[in-house]
Amino acid sequence: MAMQDVFSRIPMPTWRWLGVNDLPVPAGLADTRDEIRLSAAAGERVQHVVELRENGAQEIYVDVAEGAEASLTYIQFAPTDAPAASRIHANVARGGLFSCTLVEAGAAHTASELRVTLAGDEACADVWGLYFGDDTRKIDLNYVIRQEGWRTDANMQVRGALLGRSVKTFRGTLDFVQGARGSVGKEDEEVMILSPHARNRSVPLMLSHEGDVDGHHAVSIGRMDEEKLFYLMSRGLDDRAAQQLIVEASFEPVLARIESDELRAEIGSYLERRLLGGAQE
């Protein structure tokens, strides 16, 4: 793949035939780029909400100073017949915290890159993401937390659901560099597949150049729990409404992090419409 066609790459390439090393630039992506720069000064606590509701690309840069806390909620609600792309880069100094909640719900083709660098000692990152695919939508995600300082702490939690003939590739990387002694990291993806025609690819990576670290990663790929589904249907729900309840329960830990009641309700209603109207083949 030519460099101009690559939107993002994983930190350490694997076999090319797997087709997961690169995220392609979505076809038809508008030639517009919205750049946003956010920061939290030393000891400061800030919260930001960024939304993408149209065809285009966003680049967000976050600088978290020593002892500061920055919270970013990113919502991608692009039209479902248009492509969308985003890059979020965060740098966290000593004792700082970067908390990030991502909802990738719209767009025909989503390309999303998140790169967090825990540059200072005891810096922390807490990342929670949600994605939803239906029809023939394509979702390409590349999340990387690079742990450079001593005793850094990284948490990456991702929840997703796939319907119809949607295709999703999630790449999640914890990168412990030399000098990151005493650091810990956890990465967990849970994806629910609601159609036999949906295609899922999960690429968890853990890189370590330091011996004294504690890292864990896991992927849970499952179909609808038939016992739960039967129980809910025995209570008078049809199969789609029952599936909706189960998926919403999976998404709840991510949505609960969104402080705006109005925005949380909008996301819930949007996902409900998609779940009830999504293709089930």
Image (spheres, rainbow, N blue to C red):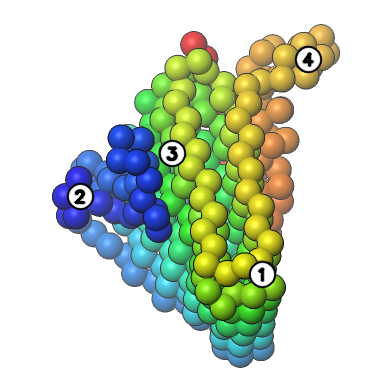
Read off the residue under disc 4.
Answer: 227
Distance between the Cα atoms at labels 3 and 1? 31 Å
Distance between the Cα atoms at labels 3 and 2? 17 Å
Q: Nearer the viewer, residue 232 or 22?
A: 22
Location of residue 60 by image quarter:
bottom left
Distance between the Cα atoms at labels 2 and 1? 38 Å
Determine the residue positioned at 24% across, 59% down.
32
Q: Residues within 10 Å of mark 4 (few under 14, many from 20)?
A: few
> In screen coordinates, is 46 left or right of 140?
right
Read off the residue under disc 3.
Answer: 169
Looking at marks 2 and 4 on the same chain, the residue that comes earlier in the sequence is marked by: 2
Above or below 234: residue 79? below
Cβ atoms under marks 2 and 1 closer than 8 Å: no
Q: Disc 2 residue type? A: Asp
Determine the residue positioned at 50% across, 38% down.
202
Read off the residue under disc 1.
Answer: 212
Q: Disc 4 residue type? A: Glu
Taking the image as drawn, is residue 17 in sight? yes
Secondary structure, mark 4, is: helix
- Residue 106: image x %, image y %? 44, 41
- Residue 51: image x %, image y %? 46, 57
Above or below 43: residue 168? above
Location of residue 100 by image quarter:
bottom right
- Residue 266: image x %, image y %? 58, 45
Read off the residue under disc 2.
Answer: 5
> In screen coordinates, is 183 left or right of 136?
right
Secondary structure, mark 1, is: loop
